[in-house]
Amino acid sequence: MKLVVIGAQWGDEGKGKIVDFLAEEADVIVRFSGGANAGHTIVHDDVTYKLHLVPSGIIAPDTRVILGSGMVIDPESLFDELDRLTAQGVDWEGRVFISDRAHLVLPHYKEIDIEQDRTRIKPIGTTGRGIGVAYAKKASRDGMRMIDSLDPAQVELLPPEDRTFIARFAARYTPLLVDLAAFMRTAAPEEHHLLEGAQGALLDIDIGTYPYVSSGSSAAAGACVGAAIGPRSIDHVLGVFKAYSTRVGNGPFPSEFRGKDTDELEELVRETGREYGVTTGRPRRCGYLDLVALRYACAVNSVDSLALTHLDVYDTVEAPKLCIAYETEAGVIEDFPSDINLLEEARPVTKSFAGWNQPIGECKTYEELPQEARSYIEFIEEFIETPISMISIGYERERTIVRRNPWKV
Ligand code: IMP
């Protein structure tokens, strides 16, 4: 079985925790896109693991994890991360593989990345990890795949700094390289493969809020090319989203908290939800859950079911609101527009709900959740026409309510 897990917003939806949870039943986890711009936090037995490149399933002891073909990989960052995992007692040797078709991020890409954003009329707010440059080189056929970096004739054409860099890391990454297409072809039919996305659907280069996006294919479609499989092999697409919305960096965000009225709510969400970037430490912009954007993300990714995270962050909110349409100069709109100017000026039409005003972190089943929380959840399901199969009510793995196991479809 192949289960795809994607972020259904602008990244930081809590995919790390959900993937870690589902990894217990996975044999193989393939991270299919992005690079060290991503940041996934996992809390296990009071230990916090912060991952950027390594798939979140690495903490599960028996899974094999693969950095897929759609990724762009900075080996320095990768081995820093793996060395940190070793120091934290995670035994990863023999379990981590890299698709030989993945592209390398070379040292000078980061400088170009930062400089390009600095001189843009409207900066995107890149994480500065060289991601956009690596994908641009890939698209213009000037990139360096992992497999190419083993060919002295190709390496010789690179600037000296890049040659030295490759020489420094090649001996460590070469034994990890695999032909991912061959690997996937020989998989036993009963194996559980989890295809893990990074960032979120609205940061995808094609379906996201272009140009305020990342440069990889973070949508479900990216799982195919990034994991070397065809679209018909996918059994279930799980979209992860938060009880509210966040975004890091620049770009339109219609349901963003604006003005004094929402100052207190913004502070509560940012502090309780720890809404600071794992990669850059930047405070995340926060807003109401945007159902217009979520419905769009579910439609264009064929999302079969959703995992709702951070619901507990709203425990003390008197009257949680949901954004159900946008008000624009062109009138009220209910579809997510491609016009970036329209999206910039859009303001949320909201619907209020009764708050539950009690901690929900100890609830073990859906039925134990307060009626008000269930009403909030059920409204979302009806609006999006997609079932919510999992609900996360705290950072720890145990604080997860499973209504329907996505592995059992
Ligand atoms: P880049 O991919 O580093 O160039 O960043 C492009 C945009 O995507 C910026 O607004 C980043 O803040 C955002 N971004 C990139 N990766 C992530 C992520 O993993 N979570 C949230 N935002 C991200």
Image (cartoon, rainbow, N blue to C red):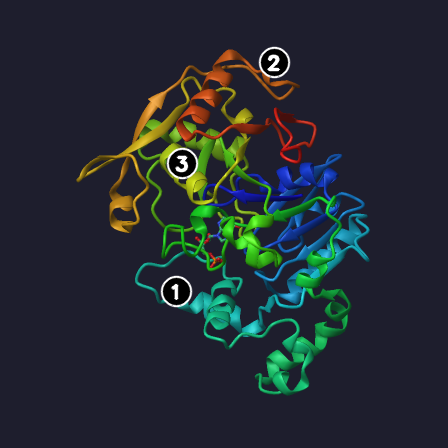
Q: Which mark is residue 368?
A: 2
- Of tags 2 and 3, the one toward the viewer is 3
- Badge 2 element: helix
Q: Amino acid at mark 2?
A: Glu
- Badge 1 element: helix
In the picture, measured across the screen, residue 370 lies left or right of residue 57, that is left
Q: Amino acid at mark 1?
A: Arg
> Is 156 placed above or below 259 here?
below
Which residue is at 31% across, 38% downward?
Answer: 335
Asked whether residue 276 is in view, the answer is yes
Is 88 or 335 nearer to us in this picture? 335
- Of tags 3 and 1, the one toward the viewer is 3
Mark sitting earlier along the chain (3/1) = 1
Instruction: Give the labeled residue for mark 3.
Output: 295
Residue density around tag 3, few if under 14, some if 14–19, many if 20 or more, within 10 Å: many
How far is disc 3 from disc 1 in space, using C-alphas? 33 Å
Circles 3 and 1 in contact, beta carbons < 8 Å = no
> Is 252 placed above or below 270 here?
below
> Is 176 placed above or below 304 here?
below
- Of tags 1 and 2, the one toward the viewer is 2
Mark sitting earlier along the chain (2/3) = 3
Instruction: Give the labeled residue for mark 1.
Output: 118
